[in-house]
Each structure stands twice: as structure tokens, then as C-alpha cells.
Image (tube, rainbow, N blue to C red):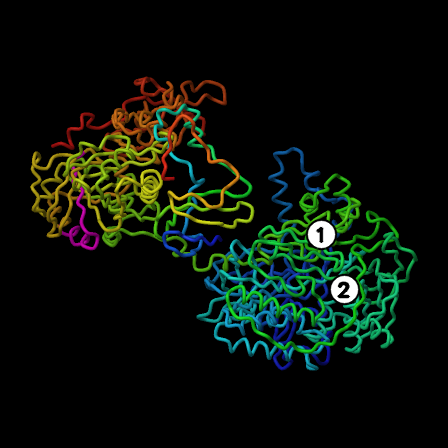
Amino acid sequence: MSQRYRLPNGGRIDRSQVLDFTFNGQRYQGYQGDTLAAALLANGVDIVGRSFKYSRPRGIIAAGSEEPNAILQIGASEATQVPNVRATQQALYAGLVATSTNGWPSVNTDVMGILGKVGGKLMPPGFYYKTFMYPQSFWMTYEKYIRKAAGLGRSPLENDPDSYDYMNHHCDVLVVGAGPAGLAAALAAGRSGARVILADEQEEFGGSLLDTRETLDGQPAAEWVAKVIDELQGMPEVTLLARATVNGYHDHNFLTIHQRLTDHLGDRAPIGQVRQRMHRVRAGRVVLATGAHERPLVYGNNDVPGNMLAGAVSTYVRRYGVAPGRKLVLSTNNDHAYRVALDWHDAGLKVVAVADARHNPRGSLVEEARAKGIRILTSSAVIEARGSKHVTAARVAAIDVAAHQVTSPGEWLDCDLVATSGGYSPVVHLASHLGGKPLWRDDILGFVPGDAPQKRVCVGGVNGVFALGDALADGFEGGVRAATEAGFKAVEGVLPKVLVRPEEPTVALFQVPHDRNTARAPKQFVDQQNDVTAAAIELATREGFESVEHVKRYTALGFGTDQGKLGNINGLAIAARSLGIGIAQMGTTMFRPNYTPVTFGAVAGRHCGHLFEPVRFTALHAWHVKNGAEFEDVGQWKRPWYFPRGGEDLQAAVARECKAVRDSVGLLDASTLGKIDIQGPDAREFLNRIYTNAWTKLDVGKARYGLMCKEDGMVFDDGVTACLGDNHFLMTTTTGGAARVLQWLEIYQQTEWPELKVYFTSVTDHWATLTLSGPNSRKLLAEVTDIDLDRDAFPFMSWKEGLVGGVPARVFRISFTGELSYEVNVQANYAMGVLEQIVAAGKPYNLTPYGTETMHVLRAEKGFIIVGQDTDGSMTPDDLNMGWCVGRTKPFSWIGWRGMNREDCVRENRKQLVGLKPVDPSQWLPEGAQLVLDPKQPIPMDMVGHVTSSYASNSLGYSFAMGVVKGGLKRMGERVFSPQADGSVIEAEICASVFFDPKGERQNI
Amino acid sequence: MLHIFCPHCGELRSEEEFHAAGQAHIPRPLDPSACTDEQWGDYLFFRDNPRGLHHELWIHAAGCRQYFNATRDTVTYEILETYPIGARPQARAQENVPQLAVTGQGEKV
């Protein structure tokens, strides 16, 4: 019998289905219906990991998402590794492979643990800050090792083979949690006809009803659950999401739900199934039925395996048929926890004693325990546990709660399980995600959700309504309220009968007193996931951390994936007592999404691999691929970078392409340039205001280069705009700036000048642009067009309509290379055919396709700027030596004019764009390199500018660059120096930025 | 994720269809040349950062591409109203709309 802690019967498990699994390399067996935690406990596995800071052995404490210790690494292969899975939330499946996330060489014999024992006293909060402060520059080095030692799971090194997705929903009522209150709420909302989503994080709906001793209408509670689920499943407007954690409550009732669709089936999702799904829900009303977490008591050595939450013990016994021990000591401050002793007793196990902090408890469950002969010690509590790797005894002593004192030496009771209950903390996390402050209620000793602007209703345990009958009624009422507020009819319902048990009040007990003071007592853990002790919190308050947020950050209380589920209230209570104030006054820390960890897979959904970002292809993309283009990403576009031939590298290809354009003719796919069709009677006036230069006199059939500035006077886009008709223009923008420019035009038209009648349409994708450039471009184009290309009939900076390759086209005679150039625009879906005709006709002319790299070189030889490369948002047209493009006499104060006339923009010695010629023509200035006037000056040197564009291979025969230099336009012929990282210095001469054909004759032939 | 009523489409749509475009009701001076550098700097760079109601400019970028204004509470993130350019807000923020004394303002913002 391997499962030696499995009870002979009981539980919602299927004993006929035995499942094999491994934990830390050891093989075990469990049953269908187990969680991994239940199966581990059934096999007597007590140590599941080592603690974060002190490396102490830790065992399973809880049965749900609040588990702080059993956080494991799951995955049978490298690709399927999932870190930080709570064993209490992982359903067991055949072949499951789990390992502890820390502990070396193993969790049972751990080297760090020895250090932890010695180092315990030496590692107060702030230990790392205090110890690794000097020298400050070493922190980065220390941190690497500290993080490694802490270790909380690891990410897989291979790609996840499974798929994940998103689903968007709208619903009238979203019910969070399917315990008694949530089920009743869903029933009420569902019956009203509202569209309802019910989500619960567990494997099964029912929450506490799955392990309660109570009956509903005289039947086991689980039968009522089954009936309700059956009814809900029959409602067409109701969606049930199991294994679905509502992790975030976001603005305007937008909630994210992380559903684990196949995590319970195996290491990988079955073929064709999605592993996890993120539901994105916009809910009309939200019903929060998130329940409450039992609060552990804080006492000495309360982290030794064998210390558990009382309610979790009941869950393991009743739901999984597992007894996590043989001899139980229960320590409580409330009536409700007595059911644990009764469940234990009923399972035929030994209840050694119940320690009750109250003076004279007489509630019905207490009396029932008494009647069964269970030993009850009043005004008492477990003040410390004993055991190194598992609990062997508990020390129960009389205590004075009010004075926080131990009043008797107490006695050591032999046991192997200590269960504690310190009351119940409503799960206010979701209710607080949007900043809502929870309210402290003395009567229930817990925080409940405060008022919030969100359209939500809180019901049941989260509302402080703990008794089963009350929770059902509260849930139903809340469901009715949510549905009616969402516009549906109110329904009536008969709720099942529940035995009403008079319960006596809970006494406020958080940290149990010890006969030594907190600092000297055995460690009393408040937050086991982050290894925060009561002594650490007291120390933090003594060191002056009084705000709850500061205490949290200093001690790490409730950090990270824990989000303060078990330790929060106890920590607050200890800090409050230490400061001599009330818990209400102390307040809580912020709760943030996500409630429990979410996998990156679920966050990414389908947005990974080639679907990560849209990719844009031009109409000619297939041709580029066929012709061996190397591609470059420009924004979302794939643009040919260069077309290598016969094993050429970039340099060789670019040199060949440049030569072909200068000597004969080249072909560039310029389709990616932004194209905006502008129409309306005020289109011309609008251009006057948006561009820096004047547009009043541009005739139909002509085109003009324009610069665009922001209001601050700095250049932000450029391009050629052609006049297609009196009220009709076609604007081109930079490839990356297309969307930005359109929005820029729209904001001014819509918000500043709505009286201007002008309309904008993006036509970037509608037209393909083939640029023919080079001295033979006219001869080549003439072979495929009916347009008169005569030098005077079709002059530079004009455009004509006609057929190219038999297809209607607009041909623009403009040039970005300095050569005779024609930009042929055809409807995009005809582009491939036109291209093929041009290529066929181009054979005798050595027509050479070229990419963006050659385009950059050719334009730089001409000194044409590329916005975003030669500009950086701090350069005016004058800085770029483009004052010729500024309409200084335009009547309207166009965008940029006032800005570029600010004092700082007109001062002397601004950085100005100039050409740079390395004195040694074989040297190449790296782009971005800083420039100085005197390379011998001491460091830090006085920098006067930097290189913006630089090219080694080109048609000039020497390396050249463009850059900005302070007062550069007045420094022609002077030398600047660029000190390099290797200590060398490149010397360059400042020159005009037009290197090739300075008179601009070639484009006019 | 905010739920925003586009006054042009007449529908509540999700935030991912929209872009925020800064504080609303900042008219471009009718005669920028009449502004001092300081006034121009105020117009360009200085914005309110209120705790409470804030009038904001938004664009329904992946929808009708129309700009509109919204009054939003920066504490609760509630949107009290959205209204077209040129309309005045019903819910008024505490702060006064910045005034440029020496220059006229566009009226349509």
C-alpha cells in the first residue's frame, strides 16, 4: 500500500483509476480526482520545497490558491516546463512530472538550509540592502547570485508546443466564484434570462459545499450542487467556466479570466485543443462571490511540515479521502474550525486535543466535539511546534489574549499534525484591484470590500456573510439585484433548508504569544512564501517603517505571486500591535492583478510567432523573393534591402547596384511610401498651413517637395506632394510616418480648422510605386508607355497620366537619387504585370533592381535627408540647411513657424547638418559616432556633434558621411575628430552635404 | 480597459480602438506671432494634471477616425461624458481652462 495516508473510503475521487506520477524523481500513485497536493499527502510526502530565504523545509499548508509553499515546477519535457504551479491547484494526471523549485542537492538534505539555521538571526529584513551596500557598484554582481540562490522555478528553454488563445465576451452578469453564494447568485441571474458567466478557479464547481458536513434539504450538499449545475447548463444564456480564475478586475467592468482547459489532462494539450484561454469579459454587472480564506495562527515553528490550515485538513479528508497525519492537535479561536476535529474523529483518527483561545466556548460544534469525548483545552493555544522535517509534538499553553501573554508553561502533546484556524479573511483582492479601500469589520475580524464606483455586488463570504444558510440567501439576493440592475426581471427562488447553528464570536488572535519575546521565540512565520516572520515585522516597525506599504516593501510581506493571501491580515495585526494602533487604522496594502500567476502563453494567446505583429508586403513581394532579395523591416513593411548576386555580400551588392543606377538604370519598389489622397476646396490652404513651404502657386500637373514640422518648429516628416486637380492633391510621406502624418492632418482639420473643407484618405496600399532611376530610365520607360516623355513636354517635378504596360498609371518625374527618374504608380493589383513588362524591356539597359541600402547611399551622395535618420526631433529646417523650404512670407502662421522662431531656435551655434569626408578615404565613420574639435582634450570631451549617415561603398570612390556639428555651416573645410572606442581617432573634413552632381544637372537631362 | 462611448459612432467600444491625445480645450492661438516665447511655451508644453475631473481629447483611431472630447475622473477612471469637438462639457473640471491673455483663441475646440 503505497498511499499510506489514504483513507479506506470517502472523497470525491475515482479509486478505480490509478494514476502514476513522479515528484523529485520518485514514482508515486494517486487517483483520478486528486489534486497533486492531495496525492502527495496521500503518499506521506511532507517536504515539498525549501523556503525562499532561510531554506527551511516546507510542506503543504492549504488546499487551494492560497497555498504558499507547494509551488512546484511541472513538466515532463523541456518544452512543457511550467514554473510556479501550486500543487493544490494542479489536477493529477497520469504521467505528471513535478519537481521542487529549490533545494540543493535535494529538498530533504539541503545545504542552504544549514546556512539558514545559522543565518536565521543574521538575516533580518533589509539584510541584502544592509550587507551588500558597499561598494555600491558591486550590487549588480551580488544581485545575480542572490537571485540565483532564491530560485522560484525556471522558464522552459524550448518553445512551448501548445497553443493558447483569447476569447472576448460581453455578459449581463459575471459571477466570480461557484461556492454556495456564487451558485445561488448564478441561479437567480440565470433564471431572469440575463446572459450570465459563472467562473470558478477549482476543478469542480461547489467551493466549500464539496467538503462541508452540512446538508442541504437533508441531502449531502454536493447533490444540491449537481442539481444547480444541471439547471444552469440547461440555460442557453449561461456560460460555465470551470478551472477559470478571474485574475484581474479592470476598469469599466472589464475582467480577465485565465482558464486552464487541458492542464488537468496531461503534459501537453490533446491534439487540436487549446491548452489555456484568456477570457476578456466586459460585464454589465459583476457579482463577487470570492469567499474567504481561513487565516492561520502565527506561532513558533509554524512552518514545519505538518502544520496546516484547519479547513484544508477537512478538505483533504472529505474531498480527497486523505488524512495528512494520524494524531491531530487543533488550535482555534472560533467555532467553525471544530468541524475539522469532528471530521478527523469521524474518519477514525486520533484527535489529541483542541486548544481554544476562548475562555468558555459553548457553540453547537464545540458541544458536539465535547460529546464525542474530544479533549478541549480552553484559554489555550499551540504556542510552538517541534520537529525538524515533520511535526512531532505541539506545545499547548494557557494564554491571555488581551495581555498577549502566556500564562502557563503548558504541555507538549505528541502529534504529527497541527491544524490552526485564526478566523476567516474575506477574499477582497478582486474588489480592490481598482484601488477600492477595504473596510475593517471588528465583528468578523476581517476586511470587507468598501464602496466602489464599479457596477458590482459582493455576496457571501467576501461580504463577511459566513454561515451557510446566510451565504446562500445573500448570493441569491445579489444575483437578483445584479440581474435587475442589468435590466432583467426579478425572480423568486426557494433556497434549500440548512441547519442553523448558533455560533459564538471569534476572539481576536493573530500572533500567538510565546513565553519568550518575539525576537527570541522560535521563528513565527507570517508569510511563508516570502519567509517573513513576526519578528521581522516588529523589527521593521522599530526601524521606523510605520506605513503598511513601507512595512510590506521592507519585509517583502505579501509580495509577488502570494499577493497576501494568508499572511496579510496577520502581518497587519502584528504591525498594528507593535505600533500600538488598531488594524483599521493600519489599513491594507494595495492588491494588484493578477490574483494568481498567469502563464505567458495565456497572456500572449495567438499573438506570437508570425502573428506577433502584422507584416506588410508590397504587391511586388513575390518578385523580390524570386530574385533573391535580402529584406529589411521598415515599420511593419518588408522592404528589399539589397539583391545579392552570386554570393555577393552587402557591400559588393550595393556597390554594383549604385553603379548600375549611375551608369544606366535601376529599379526600386517604392510602394511603401505613405500616400494620402487630399481633396476639397480648401485642400491647398490646408497644405499651406501644414507644410513649411508655400503651395499657393503649385499648378495642376506639378509636384513639390515639402517639409512638415511640429508646432515646436522641429522637422517630423517630409515628402513630395503633387497637384492632381484644383481641389485634389496626392501627398507622400515617409514609410514609417504614414499613419502618424494622417493623424496629424486629421487632428488639425477636426479640432483647429473645422471650417476648412478638406478630406483625407490613405491610399498607401492602393497604389504600387515602381521607381526607374538612371540616365537610361527615359529610354526604357518609353518602350512600355504611351506618355510623351520628352524632356520639355514632361519636365522635372511634374507628373502625367497614361498607360504603362497597358495599365492606367500616374508617372511622377521626381528624383531621390539625383538621376533622371520616373516613379510609376499603378493600381496595386496590376503592379506585378507592369513590373514584368518593364523588366523584360529593361534587359538591354542592364536594368538592375536595388534595395533600401543603395537608395540610402544614392540619396546621401546627393545630401537628401532621411527624416528620423538625419533628424531626431530637435532639428529645424534651418538646422538641416533647408531654409529654402521655409515659406517665410506665408500669411497664415503655419505649423512650425512660431516654434522655429523661438529664441533657442534662432541662436548661433546650433547643431547643423553638414557633409563629413574622412581624411583617410578608406576609413569609415560609424553612424552615431560623437565628434570633437580637439581629440587631445581630457575626458569628458566637449562634444560638438555626431554622425547621422555614413557609407563606405558607393559611386564616389571614397567613404563619406553626413552629420551634425555645432555651427557646422560656418566651418566648411575645418576638421573634426571622432574618437573611437578602441582609442583610435578618425579625422574628417567638414564639407557641403551634396557630394555628387552638386549642380543637380543629372536629374534634368 | 476603458469602455468609451464614441459620440460619432453612437456606440460604447473598447479602449483598444481609441488613442488618447492629451488634454482637451487647448486652442491654438489665432495669432501665434503675437505670443511671447513664454506664452508659446505654455501653449505647447504645459498641461494640467488634476486629481479628479479632466477633459481629454481622444480619437476613435480604429473606428470612425473622429476626434472627440471626454470628461474622465482621473481617480476612479469613470468617464462622465463624451462630446464632439466644438461642444462644451456638461461636467466641469475644477481647473479653469488655460487662458492666453494676449491672443484670441480658436472657438471650435
A725 or A75, nearer to the observer:
A725
> Against A77, is A365 above or below?
below
- Residue numbers of the magenta segment: A819-837
Percent from the top left, x then y, of residue A385?
82, 60
* Residue at 10% across, 52% down: A806
The number of numbered badges drawn on the structure is: 2
Task: Please report contact status of discs 1 and 2: CB closer than 8 Å, yes or no.
Answer: no
Q: Which residue is mark 2?
A: A306
Q: Secondary structure at mark 2?
A: loop
**Which chain contains the residue that carries disc 1?**
A
* Residue B63 vs residue A892, the one in the foreground: A892
Callout 1 secondary element = loop
Distance from the alpha carbon under mark 1 to that under mark 2: 17 Å
Q: Earlier in the sequence, mark 1 or mark 2?
A: 2
Quadrant in the picture for residue A19: bottom right
* Amino acid bearing label 1: Asp
Q: Quadrant of residue A955?
A: top left
Q: Residue at x 91, y 56 (%)?
A: A407
| Whether residue A916 is visible | no
Q: Which mark is residue A561?
A: none
The quadrant the C terminus of chain A occupies is: top left
The residue under label 1 is A531
Q: Magenta stretch containing residue A272, yes or no? A: no
Count neighbours of disc 1 (C-alpha within 10 A) and say few if under 14, some if 14 to 19, many if 20 or more: many
